[in-house]
Image: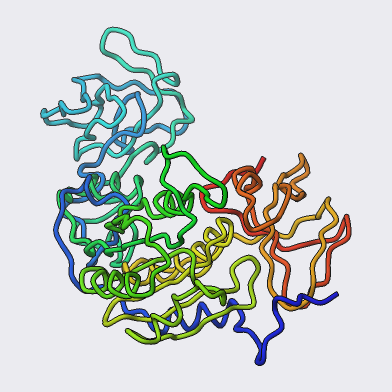
């Protein structure tokens, strides 16, 4: 079985080769800004962050109970200590303690310097300010030491870390109020094509609603990017070229959909060659073969295919790594799983295919994947229903039911 769409005068560029070319052409932004901690969520750190205070700030109790000194323990029998006060969270005990004394203490409360142990309240008996400890009482238990999590002036987070909700809490715990983050990558995106119609307008024969701009808008809604929807451009070479040149003066990245193929109205590669440079065009990928990558001035240009599913696949596998590197974010690998395929999959050799699938896991932890439905590059329903890609290599000529396949979990998806 042959993929006639992949037959070219010279071999098509492999996906891995294309990603390597893209990343070699990208340099991260160097500008940064200082923002309030909450505004840093999802942004990329521009510099290392160090602790301003110890965390915990004080030696404190890990539970409700009684704080005492280990020198008072009698390992042979029960023993009593005199309770002389209480340490509350936020209200420490300030008195001096001597041998034979203890205090009532609550979770998170400061442990006085004279004491080094805490016993759970359920293990003791208190009567008339006398606290009875069992013979099996252990020393140095249930204490959180100052700086146990992070010591003052120590490194908390490295530069190029994308700040998560957990990171915000971590930084707040060591007194960090503001952070230096890489500036947002400025992205402009267009749809091209005479057939595209705006939502709210009636369709006539030969027209379709422009879904790609809505998809790209959703895919680009991350704190690392400043995004501008430039609308729909008609299949007019002069208009397209003028629009691209103007946008390239104000944005770091231009993304277009449509017009990257070889039809009479597909002008993207021709325009990019004339007003900029083409790094590569056409990949051994399905969906998404006609993809143009290059530059106009200092602006990186991605000319994606027009078919909706091809837009998503090429964005996630090729554009997203470029944006992450440009933003200064540490690059991560996609979660890949080996799963038993429960569907018969047809494929021709020649291109690496990304089929939409539904990944599930049984009670024994084994993974199973089924096709999410029709796989045409115009079929959005199966893309909406899928939680993964079934990735079939260039040489694969189909999959039988029960065979093991590579599965890439989609960003943000859950396994059912």
Of 354 and 248, which appears nearest the observer? 248
Quarter occupied by residue 376 = bottom right
Residue 77 image point, x, y percent: 46, 26
Can you say whether 231 is above or below 165 in the image? below
Describe residue 210's horizontal placement relative to residue 178 as left or right: right
Of 59 and 388, which appears nearest the observer? 388
Dividing the image into 4 quarters, which one contains the C terminus? top right
Q: Residue at x 36, y 50 (%)?
A: 221
Can you say whether 384 is above or below 103 in the image? below
Tell which residue pokes out farthest to the front in this image: 205
Q: Residue at x 36, y 29 (%)?
A: 63
Tell which residue pokes out farthest to the top in this image: 128
Residue 365 image point, x, y percent: 74, 46
Q: Residue at x 59, y 68 (%)?
A: 288
Quarter occupied by residue 378 = bottom right
Chosen colour scheme: rainbow
Residue 149 image point, x, y percent: 32, 50
Describe residue 145's horizontal placement relative to residue 51 as left or right: right
Q: Residue at x 36, y 86 (%)?
A: 274
Dividing the image into 4 quarters, which one contains the N terminus? bottom right
Of 308 and 156, which appears nearest the observer? 308
Residue 344 image point, x, y percent: 85, 56
Describe residue 109's horizontal placement relative to residue 221 as left or right: left
Tell which residue pokes out farthest to the bottom in this image: 10
Q: How many marks?
A: 0
């Amino acid at each position: 079985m042959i993929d006639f769409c992949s037959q070219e005068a010279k071999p098509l560029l492999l996906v891995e080769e294309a990603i390597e070319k893209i990343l070699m052409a990208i340099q991260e932004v160097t500008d940064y800004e200082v923002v309030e901690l909450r505004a840093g969520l999802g942004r990329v750190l521009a510099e290392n962050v160090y602790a301003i205070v110890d965390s915990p700030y004080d030696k404190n109790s890990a539970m409700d109970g009684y704080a005492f000194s280990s020198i008072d323990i009698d390992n042979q029998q029960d023993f009593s200590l005199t309770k002389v006060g209480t340490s509350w969270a936020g209200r420490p005990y300030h008195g001096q303690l001597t041998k034979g004394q203890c205090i009532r203490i609550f979770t998170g409360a400061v442990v006085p310097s004279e004491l080094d142990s805490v016993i759970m309240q359920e293990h003791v008996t208190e009567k008339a300010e006398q606290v009875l400890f069992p013979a099996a009482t252990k020393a140095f238990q249930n204490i959180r030491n100052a700086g146990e999590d992070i010591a003052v002036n120590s490194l908390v987070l490295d530069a190029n870390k994308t700040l998560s909700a957990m990171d915000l809490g971590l930084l707040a715990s060591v007194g960090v109020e503001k952070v230096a983050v890489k500036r947002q990558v400025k992205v402009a995106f267009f749809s091209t094509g005479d057939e595209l119609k705006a939502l709210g307008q009636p369709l006539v024969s030969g027209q379709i609603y422009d879904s790609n701009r809505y998809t790209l808008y959703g895919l680009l809604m991350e704190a690392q990017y400043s995004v501008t929807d430039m609308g729909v451009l008609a299949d007019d070479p002069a208009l397209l070229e003028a629009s691209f040149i103007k946008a390239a003066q104000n944005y770091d990245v231009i993304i277009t959909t449509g017009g990257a193929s070889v039809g009479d109205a597909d002008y993207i590669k021709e325009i990019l060659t004339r007003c900029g440079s083409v790094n590569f065009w056409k990949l051994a990928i399905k969906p998404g073969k006609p993809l143009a990558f290059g530059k106009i001035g200092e602006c990186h240009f991605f000319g994606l295919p027009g078919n909706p599913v091809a837009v998503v696949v090429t964005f996630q596998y090729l554009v997203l790594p470029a944006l992450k590197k440009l933003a200064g974010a540490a690059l991560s690998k996609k979660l890949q799983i080996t799963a038993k395929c429960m569907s018969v999959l047809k494929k021709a050799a020649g291109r690496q295919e990304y089929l939409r699938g539904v990944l599930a896991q049984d009670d024994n932890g084994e993974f199973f994947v089924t096709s999410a439905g029709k796989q045409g590059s115009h079929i959005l329903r199966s893309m909406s229903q899928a939680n993964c890609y079934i990735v079939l290599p260039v040489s694969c000529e189909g999959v039988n039911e029960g065979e093991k396949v590579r599965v890439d979990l989609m960003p943000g998806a859950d396994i059912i």
